[in-house]
Amino acid sequence: MSAKPSERTAFSAIKGTKDILPDEARAWQQAEAIAKNVFELYGYREIRTPIFEATELFERGTGETSDIVIKEMYTFTDKGGRSLTLRPEYTPSVVRAIIEHRLYLRPEPLRFYYIGPMFRYDKPQKGRYRQFHQIDIEVFGESDAAIDAEIVEMADFLLRELRVSDTETLVNSVGCRNCRPGYIQELRKAAQSVFSSLCPDCQRKVTTNPLRIFDCKVETCQELARAFPEILGYLCPECEAHFRSFRAHLDLYGLSYRVDPRLVRGIDYYTKTTFEITTSKLGAQNAILGGGRYDDMMKDFGGPNICGIGFAAGMERLLSVARLDKKPENVVFIIYLGQEAKKVALETARRLRHRGVECLLEFKERGLKSQLGRASKLGAEWSLIIGEEEIKRRKFKLKNMKTGKQEEVDPEEIAGLVLESGF
Ligand code: AMP
């Protein structure tokens, strides 16, 4: 408390990370509670996995040709000489945990959610951080396109609960291991024909994975990519039927969406469905939520052949556009006058807190006026005044700080009165 605001501090938060201060943390808690409630209504249960994993998990999961693995991972060698990585996304961790704990043997639906920090060495800007937070859901073992639509519907419900407006849903299919290679061949040919105009990064992608050219943020590459062949013309009958059924289910829910054949979403593991929800309320980083199907990851990781689908939403972006009601507070500030009253005040605070009433009081005794001033500065809804007279009569003064109305109350009644007040 002694440091003056003007004093220089030796440390500051690392570039691309930020502190979530108490005022903001309230909104985070609210948004998290809303998300948890929505997910639980759809049968999802929370799963928590470690923040760091073996580097290879992401190399094989997220994919060796993804920007995340090539440029953005926080990878380090621990004291035991292992290469570890702070998770840049959640899906590979969940798949690992499911295989490791054989959760697929359980009868309950394999629907999981998670809320927590992710790490990417990305270029920090508004809406893009190096430590950011995602709300993530994953479903396993459901191949029917009805689930693809159900998770989009759930995402839509979540955004409505958070009162995020002006959204647009983009959908696509990126095919499967049967039909994608044929498309990639055509795409590579098209990319080769404009090779010299592509940025060096995309030139490399022509050989490694031309699909990743669609992720490029360079304007000229995006312009060139608009003339490339579209995957939707190359889908095999199974992928085509799946995409048709996905859209039919979205129509059933009355959800509006736009098919964007270039939506490949930066991660190598997607099969069939990909989707993204954007909002015009954000600047350049307009994607709030994105996901897709990944039917091969579980078996590629040495587990059973169980398909998966999921999405992740960025908390920072969600919170910058969510309209949350200010949570009502119901705080009692206890004012005491004299040493005897202080003891009663401490005991009263303890009793009220244990009965679910938030209480504040100060340990240094001050005059009535000064304590009342403090109560209103702190925005307390109530002040409770305890002096020698009040102790003798066993009646305390409870003041509603908003209306200024004051009444004499029995100490036993306080909790009930405050909790029922509907503040
Ligand atoms: P992704 O895991 O790349 O599919 O991203 C899913 C969502 O996470 C995006 O729609 C964003 O809302 C959020 N997100 C991704 N990267 C960042 C970042 N660097 N900073 C903040 N939010 C991010």
Image (cartoon, rainbow, N blue to C red):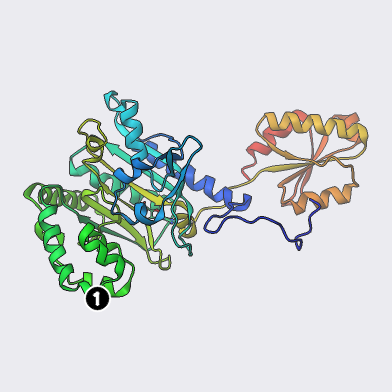
* Residue 402 coordinates in the image, percent (x, y): 72, 52
Which residue is found at the position 39% from the left and 36% from the top? Answer: 40
* Camera-side residue of 194 and 252: 194
Please state, as top left, top right, bottom left or bottom right, where the C terminus lies in the image. top right
Q: Is residue 100 visible?
A: yes
* Camera-side residue of 310 and 377: 310
Q: What residue occupies the far front of the structure in this picture?
A: 81
Mark 1, Cα crowd under 10 Å, few <14 / some 14-19 / many 20+, is some
The quarter of the rendering in which ligand 1 is drawn is: bottom left
- The tally of labels here is 1
* Residue 266 coordinates in the image, percent (x, y): 30, 56
Q: Is residue 262 visible?
A: no
* Residue 399 coordinates in the image, percent (x, y): 77, 45
**Is residue 293 shown above or below 124?**
above
Q: Which residue is mark 1?
A: 197
Left or right position of 210 against 356: left
Left or right position of 362 against 239: right
Quarter-of-image position of residue 170? bottom left
Which residue is found at the position 43% from the left and 37% from the top? Answer: 82
* Camera-side residue of 23 and 299: 299
Quarter-of-image position of residue 365? top right
Q: Element type at marker 1?
A: helix
Q: Amino acid at mark 1?
A: Ser
Which residue is found at the position 15% from the left and 72% from the top? Answer: 193
* Residue 250 coordinates in the image, percent (x, y): 22, 51
